[in-house]
Amino acid sequence: MPENKLTKTVKYSTFLKDVLISSLGAYGGPEAHFGVFTDQLVVKKKYLSEFELVELMALTTLLPGPSSTQSIIAIGYKIGGPWLGFLTMLVWGLPGILLMTLFSFLGILAFDSNSLFRYIGPMAVGFIFVAAYRLGHKIIQDNLTLSLFLLGAISTYFFKQAWVFPVVMLVGGIASIKFSKEKNLWNRTEIKPPWLYLSLFMFFAVLGIIINLTSNNLIVNLFANFYRYGYLVIGGGQVVIPMMFSELVETNNYLTAAEFLTGYGLVQGIPGPMFSFSAYAGGIAASGGSIFYHILGALISALGLFLPGFLLIYFAYPIWESLKKIKGIKIALKGVSAVAAGLILASGITLLQTNDLTLINLFVTLGTIVLLMTKKIPAPLIVLATLLLGYAI
C-alpha cells in the first residue's frame, strides 16, 4: 500500500494554521469533516496520504469518542508527537467551543435554520462526495476493492445502526486477507502499549462515578456527567444526544427543553466538532452564578466531553502504528479502506436526500464540488460564500 512520506520537518505553526483552516471549514458532521481533511491536509498540504486518512477513520470508528476529532489529533501526533497532538485538539475544538460559550450567555436565540445556514447542508454534501471520489480513485484497484466499496456504500445506506459500521469494516478486512495471495502474513512485531493513557481514562471514569454518587457541586458534576457522555459515544455524536437530553433536561433540570433544542440547532450551523455543544449546555447550567462561574461551567463541560476520546486515541494510536507493521494487517487495511470509502459515499447520498433535491441545493452542491476539485479555494472561503448566499436569498 503506498504511503505518503514527509520530506521535511513541518513547523508546528504551519500545521496548526492548517488545522484552524480545517476547523473553520468543518460543517455537517464527521463524514463532511473527513472531506475537509482530505481537501486541506491530504490534497493541498500532503501531511498524509489518502490511505493513511482512511486507516485513521477506520481506527476511530472502532473507538468511543468523536471520530473526526480523534482522527485530526492522531494526524498531529503522527507529525509532531504527543505535544502537537494536544495542540491540534485545542486549535480544532476551540472555535466551536468559544462560539457555543458565547451563545450560552445569550440564552434562547432566534435561530432560523432557513436563513443564514440554509445551504450549509448541500455544501457539506459537496465535501463528502469529493472525499469519496478521491479516496475511491486511490483505493479501488481491482474487483475485490470495488466489491468492498459497494458493500460499504449499500450496507450503510440501508442500515443506519451504529454496530453496522465496524461490522462491515471487519468484513472488508477479512475478505482482503481471505483473497490475498501473499504468504507469511503474520510476522511478529513489538507492541508497547502506552498504559498511562488507558490508566488515566479509567481513573477519570471511576472518579466520575464516585462524584455522581457523592457530590452536590455543580461544576464537578458537570465534568463527571460530560466525561461519561464522552466515552459512551460510539457511532457519532447523535448517538448520545437522547441520553444527554434525558439527564440534562428531564433529570437534572440544567436546561429547559427549548434551550437544549436551540443549542443542538446552533451546533449544526457552526464550524468544528458537534461536541462543542457541551460548552453551551454547561454554560447555561452554571448561568446562575457569576460570569466567571458561567464560563467555568462551559469550559469544564467541554473538557469532560473531549477528554475520554483524547486519552483513548493516545492509547490506541501507537498500538495501531505497531500493528500496521504486520503484513496481514496491512493487507486487511486495503479492504477496510475500500469499505470506509463506500461508507463516505453513502453518507453523502443520505445527506443529499435530507436536504431536498431543489435546483438551488443541487447548484450549491455542484458548485462546492467544482471549487474543491480546483484545489485552490480554502474551505473557510467556500463556507463564507455559502453563508452569504443563504443570507442574500
Image (cartoon, rainbow, N blue to C red):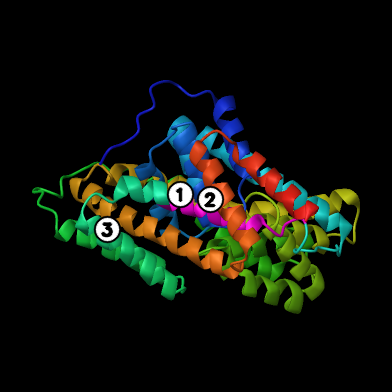
Could you tell me residue 282's position as x and y percent?
A: 76, 59
Tell me whether the residue at label 2 lies in contact with that at label 3, contact meaning CB atoms closer than 8 angstroms: no
Tell me whether the residue at label 2 lies in contact with that at label 1, contact meaning CB atoms closer than 8 angstroms: yes
| Residue extending farthest front | 359
Give above or below for 372 relative to 210.
above
Could you tell me residue 290's position as x and y percent?
A: 91, 53
User: Spatial distance from mark 2 to mark 1, Cα to Cα?
Assistant: 6 Å
**Magenta stretch holds residue 131:** yes
Tell me if 153 is positioned left or right of 72 in this view.
left
User: Spatial distance from mark 2 to mark 3, Cα to Cα?
Assistant: 22 Å
**Magenta stretch holds residue 302:** no
Residue position for label 3:
146
Q: Residue at 45% of width from left, 49% of height from top?
A: 131
Question: Is residue 92 or residue 65 the one in the foreground?
Answer: 92
Question: What label does residue 131 carry, if any?
Answer: 1
Q: Residue at 35% of width from left, 44% of height from top?
A: 51
Majority secondary structure of magenta residues: helix
Q: Residue at 70% of width from left, 58% of height from top?
A: 267
Q: Amino acid at mark 2?
A: Phe
Q: Amino acid at mark 1?
A: Ala
Q: Residue at 64% of width from left, 46% of height from top?
A: 93
Q: Amino acid at mark 3?
A: Leu
Could you tell me residue 248's position as x and y percent?
A: 73, 71
Residue position for label 2:
127
- Magenta segment, which residues? 116-132
Q: Say what secondary structure mark 3 lies in.
A: helix
Is residue 200 visible in the rendered image? The answer is no
At label 2, counting other C-alpha atoms closer than 10 Å, the crowd grade (few under 14, some 14-19, many 20 or more) is many
Between disc 2 and disc 3, whose residue precedes? 2
Q: Say what secondary structure mark 1 lies in.
A: helix
